Image (cartoon, rainbow, N blue to C red):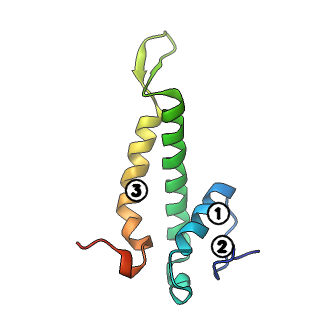
Amino acid sequence: DPDGGVGVTKPSMPAVESGIWDEVLGRFPVDERERVAGPELEAFCGQVARLREAQKRISAEWLITADPKGFPIPHPAIAIERAAQAEVRAWGDRFQPRRQRRAS
């Protein structure tokens, strides 16, 4: 199904991002999906995927890891998580239906 059942043809992307695309567009009424779909949504899906993967890694491997010499350091995924969180926050309202957007 090229539109994932959400009424808009999506670009070719990895399965995780594709699922996020469907998740986001599924929140919108059918008549608004065309306006939201596009390269910006594709980029947003990538950031959400990175955020979720970083959170999963941190949860599984803990906040502190060892460097090559065995000294404790913050998990490298923490920086990825922070960067992805900033991107998701910056784009997030664009991908919420108008009736669900936070008041500014």
Furthest residue to the top? 69
Q: Which residue does the numbered mark 2 point to in the structure image?
A: 10
Quadrant where the image shows the C terminus: bottom left
Of mark 2 and mark 3, the one earlier in the sequence is 2
Q: Residues within 10 Å of mark 3 (few under 14, many from 20)?
A: some
Q: Which residue does the numbered mark 1 point to in the structure image?
A: 18
Q: Secondary structure at mark 1?
A: helix
Q: Nearer the viewer, mark 3 or mark 1?
A: 1
Q: Secondary structure at mark 2?
A: loop
**Residue 88, located in which quarter of the rendered image?**
bottom left
* Alpha carbon separation for disc pair 1 and 2: 8 Å
Q: Is residue 14 visible?
A: no
**Residue drawn at 25 percent across, 73 percent down:** 103
* Alpha carbon separation for disc pair 3 and 1: 18 Å
Q: Position of residue 33 (x, y in %)?
A: 54, 82
Instruction: Tell me if residue 16 comes above or below residue 2 in the rendering.
Output: above
Q: Are marks 1 and 2 in contact (CB under 8 Å)?
A: yes
Instruction: Tell me if residue 28 comes above or below residue 46 in the rendering.
Output: below
Q: Position of residue 76 (x, y in %)?
A: 46, 31
Instruction: Tell me if residue 83 comes above or below residue 28 in the rendering.
Output: above
Q: Position of residue 95 (x, y in %)?
A: 44, 71
User: Is 4 left, or right, of 94 in this rendering?
Assistant: right
Per the rendering, the mark at residue 87 is 3
The amino acid type of the residue labelled 3 equals: Glu
* Alpha carbon separation for disc pair 2 and 3: 21 Å
